[in-house]
């Protein structure tokens, strides 16, 4: 009995394997067709139906690297599945096709197969020499007077090489073919500056260099416009969301649920203490002004009447401040949601703005880099920074109607600036020291 059950399982497994083998041509063709459809979808959605060009000026280098990576994967899948389709059709003879029909496997009509193959060929034929183009572009010598966007290999950190650094040597590909050496990277009897000057003259005499300069300028101009517009959106959208939500959504709800007569005037003890101090100062001010005018002394009833008027006015002011603090809490939540939503729907703009800031930061001179680093470190983690953090935290507490907890403020000041200082030092050691060692040396000399 056990042998019979085991034999049935083996037969079922072999039958399923044979059915999978008979369906190989159709499955391979469908997978290749799906890959071609995805490539066509990227072309229609991001390149107006045109070819995915790595030199396109529509997007930044980081975005084009993203599209290039997807394109390589899809092209590899399509070519491998087409090879599998041809090989499987060569091995499947008429007997296998008859067996497939008996097994209930329906093959697509020849017209549908030809239509899919024609579509796949139309899509991938535009990229048959893409690898050769990429290899040839890696060997092009970029002149020093043309702005470029070199990519730093570690953690995909983008930046512009400092003027003091030598040009980067192209990395050899996996086929171990020798790469031509650049003139500026070879050691000779002439100084490197003379060789770079000769190279610059050659580029200036090249009739095609003007078009390359114009193309690079247009790309940089487009990235700058996109970056500035996105920065403005990151600032304006949360602020507008906060004001609109506070005025039209949160404000009416808070005013409706907080009864004007019975609602709590003070949200915390600090507000109450502040109102009491203000009332005492008002009483002292009344007496002081009476002494200055040489008027007869105020009667207790008159002082009490003036104090009641001032107390009612203070109660109204702090009631409004308490309601405003509650509105700020919910309006800030709306602002954070709008900010996160803007980041999620603008992934390409984030890549562009990252490239924009990298080019600005790493394109500064060494003294400017050192000045900015010292300025930020002294403001946020320097000797006088605790006072600034204390004012900032107290302002945030008052904005939300929370009591300023001194223990929490002191604990925050004792830990958070230390963490920021560690991040600054790690960034200097990990990235800036490799990209611009002269800037690090200038920073150390200025900081001593």
Image (cartoon, grey):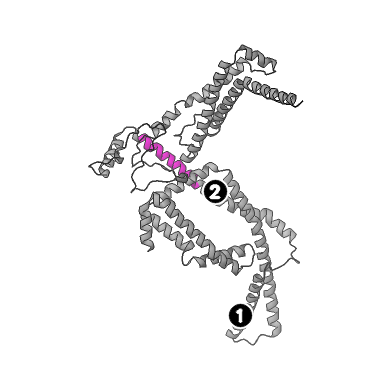
Magenta span main SS: helix
| Residue 47 visible in the displayed image | no
How far across and how far down the image is residue 50, in percent?
50, 29
Kind of element beneath mark 1? helix
- Which quarter of the rendering shows the N terminus? top right
How far across and how far down the image is residue 414, in percent?
53, 65
Give yes or no for residue 227 being in the magenta stretch.
yes
How far across and how far down the image is residue 248, in percent?
67, 53
Mark sitting on residue 396? none
Q: Which residues are magenta?
A: 210-228
412 sits left or right of 191 in the view = right
How far across and how far down the image is residue 8, in percent?
72, 23
Tell me the crowding category of disc 2: few under 14, some 14 to 19, or many 20 or more residues within 10 angstroms, Cα based: some
Q: Earlier in the sequence, mark 1 or mark 2?
A: 2
Q: Which of pointers 1 and 2 indicates the residue nearer the eye?
A: 2
Residue tagged 1 = 285
Q: Quadrant of residue 253?
A: bottom right
Residue tagged 2 = 233
């Amino acid at each position: 009995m056990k042998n019979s059950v085991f034999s049935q399982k083996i037969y079922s497994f072999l039958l399923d394997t044979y059915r999978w083998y008979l369906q190989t041509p159709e499955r391979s063709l469908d997978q290749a067709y799906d890959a071609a459809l995805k490539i066509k979808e990227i072309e229609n959605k991001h390149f107006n139906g045109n070819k995915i060009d790595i030199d396109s000026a529509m997007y930044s280098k980081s975005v084009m690297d993203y599209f290039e990576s997807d394109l390589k994967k899809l092209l590899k899948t399509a070519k491998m599945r087409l090879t599998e389709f041809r090989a499987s059709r060569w091995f499947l003879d008429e007997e296998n096709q008859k067996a497939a029909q008996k097994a209930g496997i329906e093959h697509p009509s020849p017209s549908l197969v030809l239509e899919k193959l024609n579509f796949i060929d139309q899509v991938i034929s535009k990229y048959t020499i893409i690898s050769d183009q990429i290899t040839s572009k890696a060997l092009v010598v970029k002149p020093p007077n043309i702005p470029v966007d070199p990519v730093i290999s570690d953690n995909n950190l983008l930046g512009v090489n400092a003027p003091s650094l030598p040009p980067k040597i192209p990395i050899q590909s996996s086929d171990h073919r020798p790469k031509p050496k650049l003139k500026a990277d070879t050691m000779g009897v002439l100084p490197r500056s003379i060789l770079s000057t000769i190279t610059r003259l050659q580029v200036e005499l090249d009739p095609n260099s003007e078009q390359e300069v114009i193309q690079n300028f247009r790309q940089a101009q487009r990235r700058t416009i996109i970056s500035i517009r996105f920065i403005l959106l990151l600032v304006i959208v949360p602020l507008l969301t906060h004001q609109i939500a506070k005025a039209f959504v949160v404000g009416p709800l808070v005013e409706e649920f907080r009864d004007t007569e019975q609602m709590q005037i003070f949200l915390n003890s600090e507000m109450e203490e502040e109102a009491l101090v203000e009332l005492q100062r008002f009483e002292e001010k009344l007496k002081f002004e009476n002494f200055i005018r040489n008027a007869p002394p105020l009667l207790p009833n008159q002082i009490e009447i003036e104090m009641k008027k001032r107390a009612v006015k203070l109660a109204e002011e702090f009631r409004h401040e308490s309601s405003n603090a509650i509105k700020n809490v919910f309006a800030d939540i709306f602002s954070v949601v709008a900010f996160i939503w803007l980041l999620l729907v603008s992934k390409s703009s984030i890549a562009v703005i990252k490239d924009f800031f990298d080019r600005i930061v790493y394109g500064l001179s060494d003294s400017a880099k050192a000045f900015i680093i010292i300025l930020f470190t002294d403001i946020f983690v320097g000797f006088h920074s605790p006072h600034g953090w204390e004012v900032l935290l107290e302002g945030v507490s008052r904005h939300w109607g929370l009591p300023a907890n001194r223990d929490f403020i002191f604990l925050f000041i004792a830990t958070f600036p230390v963490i920021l200082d560690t991040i600054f030092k790690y960034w200097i050691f990990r990235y800036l020291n490799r990209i611009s060692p002269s800037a690090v040396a200038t920073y150390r000399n200025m900081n001593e």
